[in-house]
């Protein structure tokens, strides 16, 4: 389970050090791809396979399905962390998410997200300000 928020830095070579508490679980490899909200998503290989299987079931006749498939698969890169727990983020993905220098890595239970620090602060401020309204709109899902 991936939980928490971690401040990290992308080095001059485009490498990101994964949080120490997750390195053992991610040591065999990860898939990094575009996230929907201009962030990057990092999946352990086993979780990526689950996501890929679900995406493949989308009806190819629906334009939105094709668009999401293109977004997720065209940006996907399988990467093996080095001995220091670093992964090399491809330049196109760093550009997509506006990642350079300081970033925030957040746990999303089954995967991690990597955010530009300023964009994360904006998103977090919005979530904190509107959390009760968001919870009310999602109440029918029976989560809380």
Image (cartoon, helix red, strand yellow):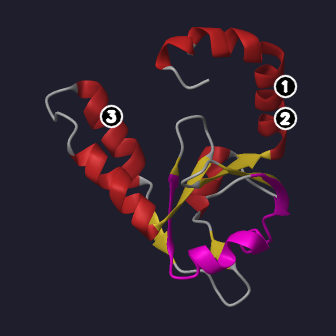
Q: Position of residue 74 (x, y in %)?
A: 37, 53
Question: In the displayed structure, does residue 36 sit left or right of residue 101?
Answer: left
Query: Which residue is label 1 attached to?
Result: 125
Q: What SS does tag 2 mark?
A: helix
Q: Which mark is residue 106?
A: none
Q: Residue drawn 30% across and 27% down?
A: 64
**Mark 2 vs 3: CB contact within 8 A:** no
- For image coordinates 78% across by 65% down, the residue present is 10
Q: Is residue 137 above or below residue 49?
A: above
Q: Is residue 17 visible?
A: no
Say if 94 sits above or below 27 in the image: above
- Horizontal arrangement in the rendering, residue 110 relative to residue 132 (left or right): left
Q: Is residue 66 left or right of residue 14?
A: left
- Sequence-earlier tag: 2 or 3: 3
Would you name the residue on which mark 3 appears? Answer: 67
Q: CA distance from mark 2 to mark 3?
A: 28 Å
Residue 133 picture location, percent across and down: 70, 9
Quadrant assignment for the C terminus: top right
Q: Nearer the viewer, residue 42 or 66?
A: 42
Residue pictured at 24% horizontal, 26% vertical:
63
Is 76 covered by the magenta stretch? no
Q: Is residue 62 above or below residue 83?
A: above
**Would you name the residue on which mark 2 appears?**
121
Q: Does the image show residue 98?
A: yes
Is the residue under label 2 in contact with that under label 1 (CB below 8 Å)? yes
């Amino acid at each position: 389970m991936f939980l928490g928020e971690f401040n990290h830095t992308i080095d001059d070579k485009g490498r990101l050090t994964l949080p120490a508490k997750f390195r053992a679980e991610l040591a065999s490899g990860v898939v990094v791809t575009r996230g929907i909200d201009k962030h990057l998503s990092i999946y352990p290989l086993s979780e990526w396979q689950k996501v890929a299987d679900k995406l493949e079931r989308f009806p190819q006749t629906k334009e939105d399905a094709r668009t999401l498939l293109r977004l997720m698969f065209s940006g996907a890169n399988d990467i093996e962390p080095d001995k220091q727990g670093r992964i090399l983020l491809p330049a196109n993905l760093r550009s997509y998410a506006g990642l350079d220098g300081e970033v925030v890595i957040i746990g999303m239970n089954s995967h991690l997200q990597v955010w530009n620090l300023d964009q994360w602060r904006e998103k977090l401020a919005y979530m904190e300000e509107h959390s009760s309204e968001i919870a009310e709109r999602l109440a029918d899902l029976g989560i809380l």
